[in-house]
Image: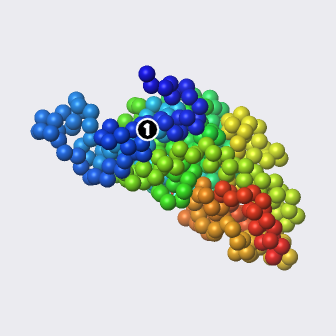
Amino acid sequence: MAFDLENAGFMTRAIHAGQGPDPAFGALATPIYQTSTFCFDSVEDGMAKFDGATPGYVYSRGGNPTVRTLELKMAAIEGGEDCVAAGSGMGAVSSVLLGLLQAGDHVIVGDCVYGCTNVVIRDVMPKFGIEVTPVDTSDLGAVAAAVKPNTKMVYFETPMNPLMKVTDIAGVKRAVGEGIRVVVDNTFAPAPVQRPLACGADIVLHSVTKYLNGHGDVIAGVIIGSAEDIAVIKNIGVTKTSGSICSPFDAFLIIRGLQTLGMRVERHCANALAVARYLEGVPCVKRVLYPGLESSPYHELVITQMNGLGTGILSFELADDVNGMSSFEAGKKLLNALQLSHIAVSLGDPASLIQHPASMTHHNVSPEVRAEMGITDGLIRFSAGLEDAEDLIADFKQAIAQL
Ligand SMILES: Cc1ncc(COP(=O)(O)O)c(C=O)c1O
């Protein structure tokens, strides 16, 4: 009898779900099935596999055993019926939209999302007859007020990139009611932090590039939800319209990364909290945006929705006048003076990464929309790595001393 993984703890599921010795030779690590196509025993066998009468693989754009292992593991980690992997986080975002929406539909989108997501939803979707209303989803009254008879989806990130506001997922579901899909980009708070489906969301997606892979060497995405929704997103969105599929080699690396997800994420969060507490006490720091701080308006949601863990990312802004420099000029000097953290976009890598949203992750968002979102020119985003917290703080101290 197989172990009851459905009721097992998070680490047990992350290690064992979807994975077992390979049937061919008993290999414990999932083999990389690096093939475009699969051979059939006969024409009849091929016909049966094509029409689904016999299970099996036919062509790697439609499915691949290594990628399937990743999908089954992610479905177990997020607690969804099924999962489909994509070639990037943006592949996942666009496949959900292309799979589930049609002309005439209305989407409510978080007013502060990753720059490329903002472009796809707010600029590209209207070209296909889809109506879009940006809303601050941390304000449940505003979400409820934005619902129209043709609203089909609410899409948001929580915490939001890069302002770190937290949305009450169960509250959004209650505010919009049944029949409107709640889609959560959970990139910033993967399990064991936050499980949106358990809070009432219908679909959860990730840029796997970040914490899920966790080693900074893959670009990929995943989408998890009901078997019915995932079948549509897979068949219409991922494998046909966007064609954004995950490669077997990337799936292999992600499966390996997922087995240490719990330990890694807890340490990323603890390091971010330590740096946030330090920055909060620095006189030339104007504001620190980190939901795990007791002073944050989102601290209560960190306890109730985020397993008390918070996230590994924080944003902050220096004072308007730092020894005669504007917060933007001082921020540039600070980034250039850091010795441990790399100046790079992305997050969730073992190494700490620091970046300037207005000129980097959100540079493709117009200055007006950036101002509307609250992304100032002085804002800096920091992704805490897995280093020792004391070393990260020592690095900030020496860089701040140079301002
Ligand atoms: C919250 C969020 N969603 C989606 C994406 C897109 O992911 P990818 O870069 O893997 O396409 C990013 C990228 O930074 C992100 O931060």
Quarter of the rendering occupied by the C terminus: bottom right
Q: Which of 136 and 22 lies nearest the eye of the viewer?
A: 22
Name the residue tied to disc 1.
Answer: 19
Q: Is residue 299 left or right of residue 131?
A: right
Residue 158 in the figure: left or right of residue 72: right
Q: Position of residue 8 (x, y in %)?
A: 56, 28
**Residue 78 point in image, percent of width and height:** 53, 36
Q: Is residue 32 left or right of residue 78?
A: left
| Quadrant containing the N terminus in the rendered view | top left
Judge whether residue 219 can be spotted in this image.
yes
Seen in the picture, residue 148 relative to 318 is either above or below; the reply is above
Q: Nearer the viewer, residue 237 or 130?
A: 237
Q: Residue furthest left?
A: 43
Looking at the image, residue 339 lies above or below residue 241: below
Q: Please report the residue visible at 49 percent of the width from the left and 26 percent of the height from the top.
A: 3
The answer to whether the residue bearing label 1 lies less than 8 angstroms from the nearest atom of ligand 1 is no
Which class describes the residues within 10 Å of circle 1: few (<14), some (14-19), or many (20+)?
some
Figure check: 358 above or below 2: below
Instruction: Let me know if residue 233 appears in the view.
Output: no
The amino acid pointed to by label 1 is Gln
Residue 141 on image: x %, y %: 68, 36
Residue 324 vs 232, above or below: the answer is below
Q: Is residue 64 left or right of residue 73?
A: left
Residue furthest to the top:
1
Identify the element where label 1 is drawn: loop
**Pick the front one: 380 or 191:** 191
Colour mapping used in the image: rainbow
* Residue 363: % across, % down: 58, 66
Residue at (47, 35) in percent of width and height: 17
Which residue is rendered at x = 39% and y = 54% of the image? 249
Residue at (72%, 53%) from the top-left corner?
272
